[in-house]
Amino acid sequence: MYILKPIIFIVLFSFLFLGSETGFAQQKDKFIVVVDAGHGGHDPGKHAKNGYKEKVVALKIALLLGKQLEKYPDIKVIYTRKKDVFVELRERARIANKADADLFVSIHCNAHHSQASGTETFVVGEGNTQRNLNIAKEENEVIFLEENYEENYEGFDPNSPESLMALTIMQEEYVEQSLLLASLIQKNFTHKLKRKSRGVKQASLWVMHNTYMPSVLIETGFITNKAEGKYLVSSKGQNELSNAIATAIIKYKNTLQGVEEEVEVVKLTPQKNKLNSADTTDVRFKVQLEAGSKKIALKGYNFKGMKNLSRIQQGKLYKYFSGNTSDYNTAKKIRLAAIKKGYKTCFVVAYKKGKRVPLATVIKQ
């Protein structure tokens, strides 16, 4: 059993700050979405006895999704692949990071020996059930199809729980935003398309952990299910699924930019609450403005006039906040004010006794 070596963490931090001298996100004219069609080339992904292949379905949905998003002049779409070619996992992350993307959306299909069915959307996180760990292992094992994978992924073992746990570190910054998008996608699948939902889940997936932006991996259905497989390979199914994902992305973008009211995030499935229902007193809400490697003085002129500033250090990373309130509605107002000042990707976080707690859980309780 291998444990992730220090060199991996160096690579992670180098990806995090790629394209910015200070490590802070750059202001862009367009909202950049990287659309990733899973697998490809000599990696077929999941496949069924009837001949359906994940790489084919994923690419068709990804291309349709891109076309939907490209209709909006303020959105730029970047594809990790537009044809049947093999793209290494680390290259997919590099494409997203180099573009300084606002979102990374990876399209996949599921498979099972039974007639299992349903959609599910994953974000990187520690809430791994045994099934989620199995899915993570299957998706991560793609690295074995790459040349020089021992060198490129030194110390990483898809079958090692220690390695999988290490993948959650860098994506912690974006979990709340990733959950928001995942929730919107699953709601569209369920309410608009009437598809069976297996929920929003967390898993340690390499393709997402190495991106420094909110990221989701969408399992659009089971190609091994007779009815669902036919739906996935049909033009009707592919158009409906791509449209549902595109609509969710637009709503996510508008929510972050304060165009709409904040959308409630669904509960992770399955996920144990980290707070008891009677244990929500003394919760403080803050708005995370940005994060980076540089320590900056907590002065208003360094943060566009934002007030009540605070800073937390985690390893080599500094997180900067505005506000410190027990009222969630007040925190939302602070967030809208920050968005107007240019902090387009800021978000509300919750702390209890100095420890970060899940925002969705606190709000629900």
Image: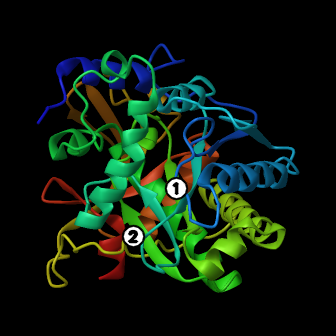
The amino acid pointed to by label 1 is Lys
Residue lying at the far front in this picture: please name it.
49
Residue 124 lies, with reference to residue 218, above or below; the image says above
In percent of the image, x 22 and y 74: which residue is there? 272
N-terminal-most mark, 1 or 2: 1
Label 2: element kind? helix
Q: Nearer the viewer, residue 199 or 58?
A: 58
Label 1 sits on a secondary structure element that is loop
- Residue at 69%, 81% (x, y): give it: 193
Callout 1 crowding tier (Cα within 10 Å): few <14, some 14–19, many ≥20? many
Crowdedness of circle 2 by 10 Å Cα count: few (<14), some, many (20+)?
Answer: some
Tell whether 123 sits left or right of 281. right
Residue at image point 59% right, 49% down: 105
> Can residue 286 be spotted in the picture?
no
Quadrant of the frame with the N terminus? top left
Q: Nearer the viewer, residue 51 or 41?
A: 51
Residue type, label 2: Tyr
Disc 2 marks which residue? 328
Find residue 64 and report its horizontal and vertical position in percent: 80, 54
Q: Nearer the viewer, residue 274 or 148?
A: 148
Between residue 363 and residue 335, name the one nearer to us.
363
| Residue 162: numbered disc | none
**101 sits to left or right of 278:** right
Q: Which-is-in-front pick, marks 1 and 2?
A: 1
Distance CA(mark 1)–CA(mark 2): 43 Å
Left or right: 51, with 359 as reference point: right
Q: Quadrant of residue 311?
A: top left
- The answer to whether residue 95 of the structure is visible from this angle is yes
Residue at numbered disc 1:
46
The x and y percentages for residue 94 are 53, 25
Where residue 286 appears, x then y in whole percent? 35, 54
